[in-house]
Image: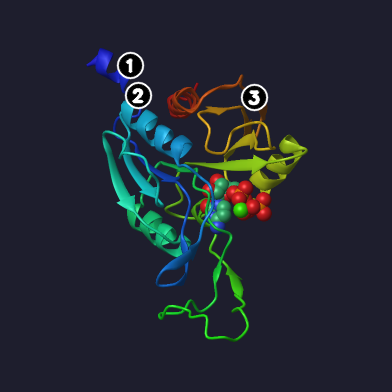
Amino acid sequence: FFAEEAHRPLAGRRAIVTSGPTHEPIDPVRYIANRSSGKQGHAIAAALATLGADVTLVSGPTRLPDPPGCTVVAIETAREMLAACAAALPADIAVCAAAVADWRVDGASDRKLKKDGGRPPSLALTENPDILATLSRPGEGRPALVVGFAAETGDVLAYATAKRARKGCDWIVANDVSPGTGTFGGSDNTVHLIRADGVESWPTMAKDAVAARLAEAVAEHFAGK
Ligand code: CTP
Ligand code: CA
């Protein structure tokens, strides 16, 4: 029993992890998306499951296999991601690693847009719901620990610290996605863990290793260390 406890410190805890991009339809055959691979989010879901958590991974379209030991909910749009996260509550832990499209097409067409000899269509955009901010909202049912990501360029720590306050989440994992860092789509990540009591900068490591270390930090948080 004690060995089990030591290796699976998150046993009995429920976690929601978002991962991947979202796809926002323009018409039945076209969409707006981004270059997120889902690698970091999927790795976090797997790492939390390894530590014993009951993980629901809510993921946009990726090329990745389902991580072992997780319940996977496949979605396409930001609104579907929010609904799937809400349906997965209650949870102790939420980690929002998805690259959610900030905007969707307002009034996407249910018919394929045609080149009818006229001008190209213009797309009116409207803002998507913020899943991290919604999960972070104080109140009954808020997960005890909500973790967001901040992919930034320039003054990464300043932007990410401001983002933590704005979103109302507990921790922010900040990374520098300037050209040349290879973070987006790559296998390595250089991150800073921003919490209420300060910043911890981690060395560059594989996304799987970032995930394992983050899961350990989550386990220590719940162990009260
Ligand atoms: N996020 C989310 N829902 C959104 C947008 C972002 O859950 N609609 C989450 C991401 O999963 C990430 C965090 O919020 O954990 C920060 O995402 P980011 O795109 O950096 O933040 P934004 O508030 O969209 O700000 P920006 O204008 O810098 O894109
Ligand atoms: Ca954004």
CB within 8 Å, label 1 to label 2: yes
In this rendering, the answer to whether 81 lies above or below 204 is: below
- The residue depicted at 27 percent of the width and 13 percent of the height is 3
Q: Which kind of residue does numbered mark 3 sit on?
A: Glu
Using a 10 Å C-alpha cutoff, classify the residue at mark 1 as few (fewer than 14 neighbours), some (14 to 19) or many (20 or more).
few
| Res 5 → quadrant | top left
Q: Return the residue at label 1.
A: 6
Left or right of 14, for residue 209? right
Foreground tag (3 vs 2): 3
Foreground tag (1 vs 3): 3
Disc 3 from disc 2: Cα separation: 22 Å
Of the numbered discs 3 and 2, the one sitting upstream in the chain is 2
- The residue depicted at 53 percent of the width and 63 percent of the height is 129
Q: Return the residue at label 2.
A: 9
In the picture, which quadrant includes the N terminus?
top left
CB within 8 Å, label 3 to label 2: no
Q: Nearer the viewer, residue 118 or 94?
A: 118
Label 2 CB less than 8 angstroms from ligand 1: no
